[in-house]
Amino acid sequence: MKSKILTVIAILAMALSACDDTTENIGMSLTDNIDKLQITTDSFEVQSRSILADSVLSKSSAGYLGRIKDPETGAYITADLTLQLHTLEDYKFPPIANIVSKDQSQNVIADSCDIRIFYDSFFGDSLSTMKLTAYELQRTLEEGLKYYSNFDPEKLGYLRNDGLSQDKTYTLTDLGVTQKVRNGKNYSPNIRINLNQPYTDKDGNTYNNYGTYIMRKYFEHPEYFANSYNFIHNVCPGFHFKMKSGMGCMAYVNTTQLNIHFTYHNPQKDSTYAVTSTFASTEEVLQSSKISNDSKSLQSMLNDNTCTYLKTPAGIFTELTLPVDQILQKHQNDTLNAAKIVLTRVNNNSQSNYGLAVPNYLLMVPKDSLYTFFEKNSLHNNKTSYLVQRDHTTSNNVTTYKNTYTFSNIAGLIRAMGDAKEKGGSNFEALHPNWNKVVLVPVTATTTTNSSGTTVYSKVLNDMSLTSTRLVGGPGNKRDKIRISVIYSKFKGK
């Protein structure tokens, strides 16, 4: 019964503290002589600093391709894309007798072949002239391995030296397509790379284009098309798209397709059609975005101790040192009911129309768990890891965002850190220098609805999109200090 009372009082206390900047006399307002419960409050300063993310687990349903300059910080960000292609189970081309597209020796050929990189949104100027090169992989990305944002397939020997290599100069707004078509409901914006030049496979066989290679592989070995694993390991290991030049836009890629165009005769209808066979990147196969940040610009931000930074993709995180000893000192007989931190953004100084987005979700995770949390596909448990959305209000379906992120109650984490130190012995801090440190990581969060109709989080991943913000804090902070507000309770006389 006492436990239930303490829980209810903690909730009420947090609600009241959210409505008033002061917490004086909360204990008097919530207790009576029957319960004999004493509530006290306190607050402590939290130290913070920016830390280099170096690289993050590149696991996302979206890919990124392009190069931009952050208008506020001046940092350059380049994204290259590596991916595999998926085939349907027991994929089949039409019977060879019904394929009209054949050469003089009656071998099947593709009329043409292309790769289309479809994007659903972008950052920057869609008229910026960009150039990339599409490379064929000589070996594939294997399942079960962890691919981070600094994974470089070129440096690690994944690219086929004498394989397919095709340059493409493009603008995200495809001026080769009429505006009427671009505005049509059936148009999906994409970067089109033609693969119609002669192609030589690894065995030295030459074809008129890459699509012909795929078609003939099918008729030689249809078992290679039985599933994606066979296709990837025997026919098409994948592609790497590397930015070569240009500046000003970043595409958020939702899927990439290899399209093989040929002519087919339908004997039932006695009609001939131009058809397309498609192999696409999907969540069933792997894709990885290689992120290259301008190291000088990042170092300049790390040297700025008047604030801390959150910058994605794979840029800068904010580290907090929690005053665990101070919070628990002299309160061994008290119950720590609540511990609240409010983090405030520093307004963006940029006047550009292309300012980076502000991170929407922040994950707080112990520093020593920063990488394993994502590698294990973990979800926040509200005990040692916490997820919050940027503070906001919604009225008439209009959401207004605030300049703050609020972690309402991390008391469980404080207690866990204190218990670990108490059990760890005299040499604990030397062996575990990060024992009271957490990292704030911008993430994307996916929700699903379970069988009972409740919305729950199903996936938390590193945010690989372009975001940036500054937080109040840092060793040279001249603004209000970051503080953690805590609430204790105990029965009088205990």
Image (cartoon, rainbow, N blue to C red):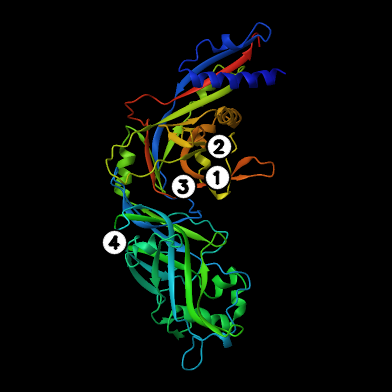
As measured in the structure, the alpha-carbon distance from the residue carrying label 4 to the one carrying label 3 is 26 Å
- Mark 4 or mark 3, whichever is nearer to me: 4
Q: Specify the amino acid type for callout 2.
A: Ser
- Residue 295 on image: x %, y %: 32, 49
Secondary structure beneath label 2: loop
Q: Specify the amino acid type for callout 3.
A: Asp
Residue 129's mark? 4
Neighbor class of circle 2 (other Cα within 10 Å; few <14, some 14-19, many 20+) is many
Secondary structure beneath label 3: loop
In the orientation shown, which residue stands out farthest toward the bottom?
105
Disc on the earlier residue, 3 or 1: 1
Disc on the earlier residue, 2 or 1: 1
Residue 463's mark? 3
- CB within 8 Å, label 2 to label 1: yes
The picture quadrant where one finds residue 33 is top right
338 or 47, which lies in front? 338
In the picture of the structure, the residue carrying the numbered disc 2 is: 385
Residue located 40% across and 32% down the image: 403
Disc on the earlier residue, 4 or 3: 4
Q: Specify the amino acid type for callout 4.
A: Thr
As measured in the structure, the alpha-carbon distance from the residue carrying label 1 to the one carrying label 4 is 39 Å
